[in-house]
Amino acid sequence: MHVVIVGCGRVGSSLARNLVGEGHTVAIIDRKPAAVERLGADFSGQMLTGIGFDRDLLVAAGIERAEAVAAVTNGDNSNILVARVARETFGISRVVARIYDPQRAAVYQRLGIATVAPALWTTERVLRRLVPDAPAVEWVDPSARVSLVERSFSAKWAGHRLSEVESSRVRIAAISRLGSAILPTPDLVVQEGDVVYLIVETEAISHLDELTLNPPAGSGH
C-alpha cells in the first residue's frame, strides 16, 4: 500500500524505513530539507519539503492513492491539521496522529482519529513499575468505548478459573505467566503472579480493582 508520512524526525524516518522494508511505497514530508539525511542514502521512497498540511503538497505525495497517513511532527497543531485534512478532504480511513497532550489525544480518538500520546504512554509504564497497582491502559478504540487493560490478580484468585472474571463487559484477551504470553482456555486456572490482559468496556474500568482483588462470591476452586 501507499503511505504518506508527515514529519521526518526519529519516529517518521524510522516508520518510513520500516514500511519501505516491508514492501510498501512511502512519501514523507518535512519542512526541513536536511531531514532527508535521517532516511539514509538507500531510501527508495519519495521525500518532499514543505508544510505537511498543504493540500497541493499532499497531492504531490500521492495522498489521493494512499491507504494510510501518519502525522508525526513535533507539533500537536500540525499533526491535528494533517489528520483532519487526510480524513475530511481526502477520505483516508487509516490516519494516525502523534499528539503530545493526552487530553487532546482523547478528544481526537473520540472523533475517530487514532492517536499516539508519547507522554501518556511513558507515564503509564513508569507508574506501572513504581506503583504495581497503578492502572495500565494499553489501548483504547477510536470511539473510546472499549479498552485493553493490564491487571494483576491478587493472591486470593490463585486456584480459581480465569473464566470467572468474564462478564458481558469484560473479556480476557491473554495472560502473561512466567514471562510468556498464552491465550486463555475455559479451564485455565489462575496462578499467583499472573498478569492478565482484559478487553473492557471503558466505563467498567473503575470496577476492575475490586474484581481483580476478590473472586466472585460463591465461586470455588
Image: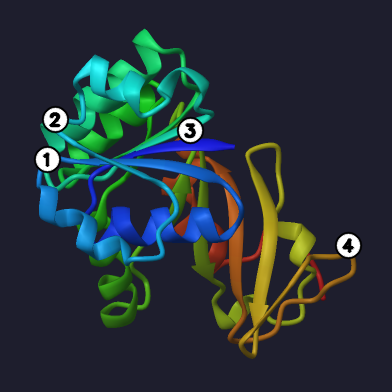
Give the number of marks: 4
Depth order, front residue of 72/106: 72
Q: Which residue is mark 4?
A: 186
Circle 3 packing at 10 Å, graded few (<14), some (14-19), many (20+), is some
At 63% from the left edge and 39% from the top edge, which residue is drawn?
169
Mark 2 / mark 4, whichever is N-terminal: 2
User: Considering only vertical position in the picture, is 20 above or below 40?
Assistant: above
Q: Position of residue 20 (x, y in %)?
A: 51, 54
* Residue 172 in the figure: left or right of residue 201: right
Q: Is residue 36 above or below residue 188?
A: above
Label 2: few (<14), some (14–19) or many (≥20) C-alpha neighbours in 10 Å: some
Taking 213 as reference, is 31 left or right? left
The crowd level at tag 4 (other Cα within 10 Å; few <14, some 14-19, many 20+) is few
Residue 5 lies, in percent from the top left, at 34, 41
Please identify, in this view, whether the residue under mark 2 or under mark 4 is nearer the observer. 2
Of labels 1 and 2, earlier in sequence is 1
C-alpha separation, residue under disc 3 versus residue under disc 4? 38 Å
Whether residue 217 is visible to the viewer of this picture, yes or no, is: no
Q: Judging from the image, what secondary structure is the residue with disc 2 in? A: loop
Q: CB atoms at circles 1 and 2 under 8 Å apart? A: yes
Query: Closer to the N terminus: mark 3 or mark 4?
Result: 3
Question: Label 1 belongs to which residue?
Answer: 31
Residue 63, given in percent of the width and then of the height, sits at: 41, 23
Residue at 29% from the left image edge and 19% from the top image edge: 84
Residues at marks 2 and 4, CA–CA distance in whole angstroms? 53 Å
Q: Which residue is mark 3?
A: 68
Q: Which mark is residue 182?
A: none
Q: Earlier in the sequence, mark 3 or mark 1?
A: 1
Nearer the camera: disc 3 or disc 2: 2
The residue that disc 2 covers is 51
